């Protein structure tokens, strides 16, 4: 088995490469781990992790491969899209980015413990397929995606954390991204709502550092949790944001008047006006038509062992 650490040197506030190298050197001094085969690769730009992982899998088809995405959710997304379709490959992550939301599903796990990662066992998890790409955590459409787009402008500011960058992106989007016009189909059935604020297709539970839009989600239950939030005034939205953030909105009847919850196999959004922004694990795109579908138990994931 080979262990491949793909490190995004621009994730977070500092390059974590030296920290990971030091942890590996300490680990290799133990008798149990001294003979493990590993490789460290630092990404050189956008999509480099995807290309590197895919080429590696293509070249080493007869070897069991474990890829560790060292960065934020965007780095995980790139690695997942690189190894998808290769049965000999699995992935895990070492969270060191500005946004590390995917791992929050696994409340009892320490993904910064390399020993626990290497000792972890393989399991199948679900993904969400969006216009031919794969999402491991949450796909946002409309307002949320605009927030993520604006967040990238703030996350590299001094003293700005992933959480506060998201909040700054949220404030900026309140002035320009509050209503989107589209036909929305759930499992082929058109729903009535044309003017909507945002939509989510969720595998994980959290986005934006602290916004628990899908608090009861699981990545291995064969269910895609989808939300469509109706258009509302800025004032109403600001009143409900706190409960949306902490995941308690599901218990509030007044808030749920504005939110429709679905558990479909697929969801389609066709814009009636301009292209709509959508985000896959925080990486944003724009298109007229967005096709979202559940991909059940389609990739191998390594959860750290619990000691």
Image (cartoon, rainbow, N blue to C red):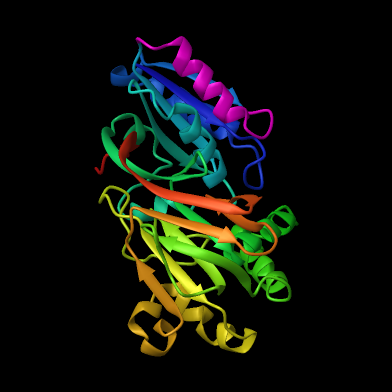
Q: Nearer the viewer, residue 155 or 87?
A: 87
Q: Position of residue 59 (x, y in %)?
A: 47, 10
When asked about the image quadrant of residue 78, the answer is: top right
Q: Position of residue 247 (x, y in %)?
A: 40, 73
Q: Give me the residue at 64% from left, 51% from top.
A: 287
The quarter in which the C terminus is drawn is top left
When asked about the image quadrant of residue 243, the answer is: bottom left
Q: Give me the residue at 43% from left, 77% from top.
A: 259
Q: Position of residue 230 (x, y in %)?
A: 51, 77
Q: Is residue 248 left or right of residue 234?
A: left
Q: Using the image, determine if residue 131 lies above or below residue 138.
A: above
Query: Is residue 56 found inside the magenta-colored segment of the image?
Result: yes
Q: Give me the residue at 62% from left, 89% from top.
A: 235
The quarter in which the N terminus is drawn is top left
What is the chief secondary structure element of the magenta stretch? helix
Q: Is residue 141 left or right of residue 169?
A: left
Query: Is residue 34 found inside the magenta-colored segment of the image?
Result: no
Q: Report the span colored magenta.
A: 43-62
Q: Is residue 157 left or right of residue 24?
A: right
Q: Position of residue 145 (x, y in %)?
A: 60, 60
Q: Nearer the viewer, residue 85 or 41?
A: 85
């Amino acid at each position: 088995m080979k262990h491949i650490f793909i490190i995004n040197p621009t994730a977070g506030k500092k390059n974590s490469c030296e920290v990971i190298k030091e942890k590996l050197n300490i680990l290799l001094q133990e008798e149990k781990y001294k003979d493990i085969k590993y490789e460290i690769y630092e990404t050189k730009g956008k999509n480099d992790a995807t290309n590197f992982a895919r080429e590696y899998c293509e070249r080493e088809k007869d070897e069991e491969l474990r890829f560790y995405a060292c960065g934020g959710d965007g780095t995980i997304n790139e690695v997942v899209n690189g190894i998808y379709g290769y049965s000999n490959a699995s992935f895990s992550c070492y969270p060191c980015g500005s946004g590390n939301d995917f791992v929050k599903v696994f409340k009892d796990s320490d993904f910064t413990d390399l020993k626990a990662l290497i000792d972890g066992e393989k399991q199948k998890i679900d993904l969400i397929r969006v216009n031919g790409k794969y999402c491991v955590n949450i796909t946002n459409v409309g307002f949320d995606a605009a927030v993520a787009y604006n967040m990238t402008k703030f996350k590299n500011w001094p003293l700005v954390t992933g959480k506060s960058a998201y909040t700054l992106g949220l404030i900026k989007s309140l002035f320009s991204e509050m209503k989107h016009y589209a036909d929305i189909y759930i499992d082929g059935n058109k729903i009535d709502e044309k003017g909507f604020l945002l939509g989510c297709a969720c595998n994980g539970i959290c986005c934006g550092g602290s916004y628990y839009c899908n608090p009861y989600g699981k990545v291995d239950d064969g269910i895609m949790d989808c939300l469509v939030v109706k258009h509302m005034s800025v004032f109403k939205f600001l009143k409900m944001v706190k409960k949306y953030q902490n995941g308690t909105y599901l218990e509030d009847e007044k808030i749920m008047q504005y939110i429709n919850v679905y558990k479909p196999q697929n969801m389609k959004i066709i814009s009636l006006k301009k292209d709509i922004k959508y985000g896959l694990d925080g990486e944003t795109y724009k298109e007229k038509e967005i096709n979202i579908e559940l991909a059940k138990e389609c990739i191998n994931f390594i959860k750290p062992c619990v000691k």
